[in-house]
């Protein structure tokens, strides 16, 4: 499957909203946001998110959005040296294609490594494929939060990881 990767723009809002909500609904344990809360948000809320956050998307050969990843860069003087990688979701039909690695690598090389000292992320401690991916990209674990998320009556631990560019 040929994949095109680019930053999402306002014209992608509807596709972005649909894929984001799918990810939240299918894997509530993987996101701090909830499907129930975001499903109530307007299309303009999602458009605003695309305008104020760096969100990359992967598109298949039919120009269908099949993967997303976001990079949040704070504007506060004391924290703008570190970004947060978040909201990564790959649709089932695009899994195993290397899209996650391509999305994250593109985001790091075009928006992170020249302006940030490091990128941090959280990942479910149970998510071995994602942890393996992040380790392969150079991320190192620096923390483990027990019971970080609660979905219904189930708790999920999360790992904190960082990729450092400047020491």
Image (cartoon, helix red, strand yellow):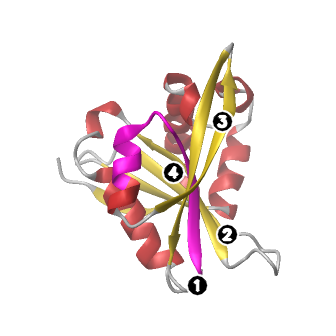
Residue to which mark 3 is pinned: 146
Inspect the magenta stretch and tell me whether residue 37 lies in it.
Answer: no
Q: Say whether disc 3 or disc 4 marks the residue closer to the N-terminus.
A: 4
Side (left or right) of 42 relative to 100: right
Placement of the C terminus among the 4 image quadrants: bottom right
Looking at the picture, how far across and down is residue 160, in whole percent?
A: 58, 53
Question: Which circle marks residue 124 in the picture?
Answer: none
For the residues marked 1 and 4, what is the alpha-carbon distance in whole angstroms?
26 Å
Question: Which circle marks residue 73 in the picture?
Answer: 2
Question: Which circle marks residue 12 in the picture?
Answer: 4
Q: Secondary structure beneath disc 2?
A: loop
3 or 4: mark nearer the eye: 3
Residue to which mark 1 is pinned: 115
For the residues marked 3 and 2, what is the alpha-carbon distance in whole angstroms?
26 Å
Quick one: 10 or 46, which is closer to the camera? 46
Q: Secondary structure beneath disc 1?
A: loop
Q: Say whether disc 1 or disc 4 marks the residue closer to the N-terminus.
A: 4
Q: Residue at x 81, y 79 (%)?
A: 78
Q: Quadrant of residue 93?
A: top left
Q: Secondary structure beneath disc 3?
A: strand
Label 3 Cα crowd, 10 Å radius (few <14 / some 14-19 / many 20+): few
Looking at the picture, how far across and down is residue 148, in whole percent?
A: 68, 36
């Amino acid at each position: 499957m040929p994949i095109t990767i680019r930053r999402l723009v306002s014209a992608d809002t509807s596709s972005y909203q649909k894929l984001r909500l799918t990810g939240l609904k299918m894997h509530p344990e993987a996101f701090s946001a909830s499907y129930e809360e975001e499903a109530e948000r307007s299309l303009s809320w999602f458009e605003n998110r695309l305008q104020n956050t760096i969100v990359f998307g992967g598109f298949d050969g039919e120009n269908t959005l099949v993967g997303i990843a976001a990079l949040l860069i704070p504007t506060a003087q004391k924290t703008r040296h570190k970004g947060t990688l978040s909201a990564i979701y790959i649709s089932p039909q695009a899994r195993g294609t290397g899209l996650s690695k391509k999305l994250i690598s593109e985001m790091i090389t075009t928006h992170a490594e020249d302006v940030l000292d490091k990128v941090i992320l959280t990942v479910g401690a149970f998510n071995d494929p994602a942890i393996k991916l992040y380790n392969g990209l150079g991320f190192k674990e620096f923390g483990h939060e027990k019971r970080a998320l609660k979905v219904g009556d189930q708790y999920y631990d999360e790992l904190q990881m960082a990729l450092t560019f400047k020491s």
